Image: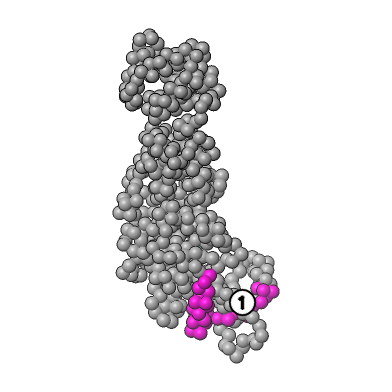
Amino acid sequence: MASATDTVSAGSTARDKVVTRFAPSPTGFLHIGGARTALFNWLYARHHGGTYLLRIEDTDRARSTDAAIDAIFDGLEWLGLGGDEPAVFQFARSDRHAEVAHKLLEAGHAYRCYLTQEELAARRELAQAERRPFRIDSEWRDATPDHWPADQSYVVRMKAPREGETTIVDKVQGSITVQNSELDDFIILRSDGTPTYMLAVVVDDHDMGVTHVIRGDDHINNAFRQLVIIRGMHAIEGGWPDPVYAHIPLIHGADGAKLSKRHGALGVDAYRDEMGLLPEAVFNYLLRLGWGHGDEEIISREQAVAWFDIGDVNKGASRFDLKKLLNLNGHYIREADDARLAALVAPRLATLAPGFAPDKGLDLLTRAMPVLKVRAADINELAAGSVFLFAQRPLAMAEKAASLLTDDARAILTKVAGVLEAENVWTTEVLEATVKQMAEELGIGLGKIAQPLRASLTGQTTSPGIFDVLALLGKDESLSRIRDQAA
Ligand code: GLU
């Protein structure tokens, strides 16, 4: 075994090439915390010119689903966090895990434990009655083969060190020391011969060449147990160095409570599909959740790769702030390419705007993006804002819009139609000049024309600038819509 007092530090374990991994359990969809863990692993590998791997920890057969696996891959791809190599599936490697368990067993780092469930329960109860913490103290730890009962099933337990202490110099949490007497003889092979999670993680990390284990801080306690296995194998065959650990804090809601749906924490697919967010916004938001570079709020992928260091991740829990995420999304929408945005909006128009036909409408949608995107925080808002473009005549009027269309207003629309009919240069600037001149000649404020004009063209009281709306709809459609409402 490794010496009783041992320290893991980055320096002592540094290997040539950084290899990180994201190892989700596919028992649920890819949630925001998992996505951030994936991001930090990806960034660390990219920053160091290393490799970023994926491992699907599907050993919990009852709770792992194909739907969850698909959703995890899908969400990671969307965020640009797919693995550098095909994912490793943990369950398929059970034989290899068992092989390692047997090596540990043969070398005396692990032992066959024949304690029965009943015996364990009785000991647990006794400990409780005597108000002392329960520790496995198996008489089988040092039993020799001649004492092994025939025909009785056993589990394989690690011989955890009992004296001294173990220190992990965690890249995020700092130095953490645990008394080895706190470590129990945990199980690595169940009585049916199947490997436990604790063993599988260690064997897979080793076989995948993982140098840096970056994961949620709910796994810190596991790290001390996993080190017992690692050091056992290192003593047996060498080449099992301690990994560098970085345990990142959990994400909490804005109220400080554990993050839940109530805080707007959804699966990554919901951010894309239901909330209409862009992946670069989610990427940027997750990046800033617990990590920062000065006061920079908007950070590109390239900058993130250049600046990221796991040591700069905050030790305290970070707070999820939906408003911030939406603000960032608005920023990235304004930056995004118009054709790309139009393609994202188009599927949403199927139900919102029955008049929208993708083959014809996509061009108009794309041309409308510059004026729509300055007003939208997400793809849903872009879609809602573009509905008027594809509305069918005569337009259905929203209540407020209808109330603007008084007799006076309808009379003004008749005049506007007449003036615009004569206009041959149909651009925002020219249309603006024409309508302004008309307002002057009539001696009325621009609003007196613009308000009914907007109602007639969009059926709404809010829309992009009215001259942009005219220009986008084109002369024929604009005049027809105006005349539909004119006196
Ligand atoms: N499968 C574990 C989880 O989803 C992660 C294990 C690890 O990163 O070591 O929490």
Describe residue 121's horizontal placement relative to residue 142 as left or right.
right
Residue 232's place in the image compared with 53, above or below, is below
Nearest the eye: 312 or 166: 312
Give the amino acid type for the residue marked by disc 1 in the picture. Answer: Asp
User: Who's the residue at 42% across and 25% down the image?
Assistant: 476
Residue 300's place in the image compared with 62, above or below, is above
Residue 354: image location, x then y, percent: 53, 36
Instruction: Tell me the quarter of the image containing the N terminus.
Output: bottom left
Residue 153: image location, x then y, percent: 64, 80
Nearest the eye: 357 or 276: 357
Residue 174's place in the image compared with 462, above or below, is below
User: Who's the residue at 37% across and 13% down the image?
Assistant: 439
Picture mark count: 1
**Dot 1 corresponds to which residue?**
192
Q: Determine which quarter of the picture holds residue 479.
A: top left
User: Who's the residue at 69% across and 74% down the image?
Assistant: 118
Residue 330's place in the image compared with 17, above or below, is above
Task: Give the residues in magenta.
Answer: 91-120
Q: Is residue 97 magenta?
A: yes
Nearest the eye: 373 or 183: 373
